[in-house]
Amino acid sequence: MPPTPKLSIKNISKSFSGRSGDVKQVLHEVSLEIEAGEFVAVVGASGCGKTTFIRIIDGLIEPDGGEVRIDGHVVTNPGPDRGFVFQHDSLFPWRSVLANVLFGLEARGQPRRAAAASSRELIKLVGLSGFEDHYPHELSGGMRQRVNLARALAVDPQVLLMDEPFAALDAQTREIMQRELLKIWEQRKKTVIFITHQIDEAIYLADRVLVFGSRPGWVKADIRIPFARPRALAVKRTPEFIGYVDRIWNLIEDEAVRAMGSETPET
Amino acid sequence: MPRRTTEIKSAGGALPATREARLTRRRAVYSIALGLIAWELTGRFLITDKILFAPFSKVMQTGWQLLQSGEIWPHVYISAVEFLLGFGLAAAAGVILGALMATNRLIQDYMDPWVSFFYSSPLVALTPFYILVFGVALGSKIAIVFTVAIFPILLNTFVGIRSTDPHLLEVAHSFNCTRLQIFGKILFPSALPFVITGLRLGIGRGLTGVVVGELFASQSGVGYLIAAAGQSFDTPLVLLGVLLFSLAGVLLMGLLKWLELVLAPWRQTLKFK
């Protein structure tokens, strides 16, 4: 018998009913398995249900059918085995950097002193030492996303779920954050699911890129990225890399163009 | 915490900002001084009828006399007790009811029409009724202050909790927070600035409540002093009473500002951005 995968997703479907009463299927029978320590990126045109997909894995949204298992256990609610990094700037404005990072531990009832100690370590890991007592509005967008990442890592989850965490950053900051994320991932060996609409970001970061088809979302392609690790940012300029970009772009081009015509906010 | 934030600000070109703030403060002092001089001159040369107006110096003189005889203190004390009890009860009840209303759909649906109705009603008009029910002593004034102050506090607490960023609630869910944690760690701190705004509105209304209650029927209090002075054509004393209420308002607002600084330090630096 093969070992149980870290994350096993079976036949997940989800529909939402719109305001006018019409039912829109967002995900249709999505199945996949992810090994421990794997970095999986999900790309797709907007409206392909990737945000819904990652929220179902976190337990924030209940699927209509199918199941998510972590180490063989069915997921029904958010749990400490998963950490979620949100796209939006979702830091608590009334909490300092340190207090934001230790939020998860505090919510779990861990003593403040121990929580603060491990949180300081994470703040150092994401490169924000010295900013512990700053408030979020005093930080740049990139720094805020570092705090966001540290906050998710603080509860020491096995699976890190990242929902377009760098989407709001400028191009340079984004590249730096990609490199930093890989460094942290190599140190902490988390299983990562990373949602993005940037193809090059997905290829640079991931061991596997899942290409989602649209309306309803389904796994159109599962592409293994063989570049050696640690990866330098320069890998993005190699012909092999560009070959992958082309291949994935061809898979989603039609849908991306179609999505532009009927832009609907993702749920 | 606030000390550290000022350090950051001073790092990034804060010098012209403080200079501007100093200028603003200086102009405020000039403005007040000019106003008082205008008051004094008007009282001395423009409106010389003693019943119609009194110069600032005369009002101060009356104040000094009352202070020396100690006559003023029982009145100030009574008015203060009326206000503080009424306002304190209104603050506690307003925050609790506002929070209940914001977090429970059933309570909200049943309370909403009444809150909207009372919030937009001039509730000081209930004064004669309250005096009939609670008598001319403390009780009726406390009830008036409570009635007029509670609605802005309740409504602002409600709106504050309701306008919590849904993304922050999602974070809380993702960390598996309990309902109590969500309230204490997310909803309440998020609503706090709104609550303070509600308290500020409540102070203004509550002071009006004290004045109206005491003007209407009472045997003591600063409002009573004003009413009695008016009946004996003692204009300086009337103006003194008004001035006392204004000072109380300014003092309470300052206290609230300080409270905001202590409770919500993250908002202070936000304002300067």
Image (tube, coloured by chain):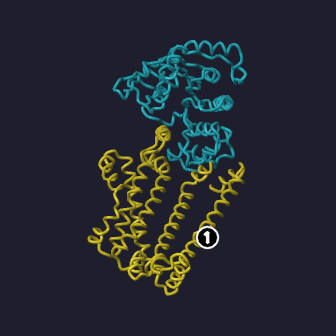
Determine the secondary structure under disc 1: helix
Query: A165 or B141, which lies in front?
Result: B141
Residue at 47% over, 21% down: A262
Tell which chain the image draws in yellow: B
Residue at 59% over, 24% down: A39
Query: A119 or B151, which lies in front?
Result: B151
Q: Which residue is the extreme one toward the bottom? A: B69
**Does residue A218 appear in this view?**
yes
Near mark 1 (Cα within 10 A), the count class, few <14, some 14-19 or many ≥20, is few
For disc 1, the chain is: B
Q: State the image coordinates of residue B37 (x, y, percent, origin top left).
A: 59, 73
Up-down: is A198 above or below A239? below
* Three-letter amino acid code of the residue under disc 1: Ala
Image quarter where the N terminus of chain B lies is: bottom right
Residue at 36% over, 49% down: B101
> How many numbered markers are drawn?
1
Q: State the image coordinates of residue B53 (x, y, percent, origin top left).
A: 48, 76
Up-down: is A236 above or below B168? above
Q: Chain A hue? A: cyan
Up-down: is A103 above or below A220? below
Q: State the image coordinates of residue B191 (x, y, percent, origin top left).
A: 47, 50
**Does residue B76 appear in this view?**
no
A98 vs A67, left or right, is right
A78 vs B218, left or right, is right
Query: B135 or B25, which lies in front?
Result: B25
Query: A113 or B136, which lies in front?
Result: B136
Q: State the image coordinates of residue A10 (x, y, percent, origin top left).
A: 44, 21
Up-down: is A99 above or below A164? below
Residue holding disc 1: B33
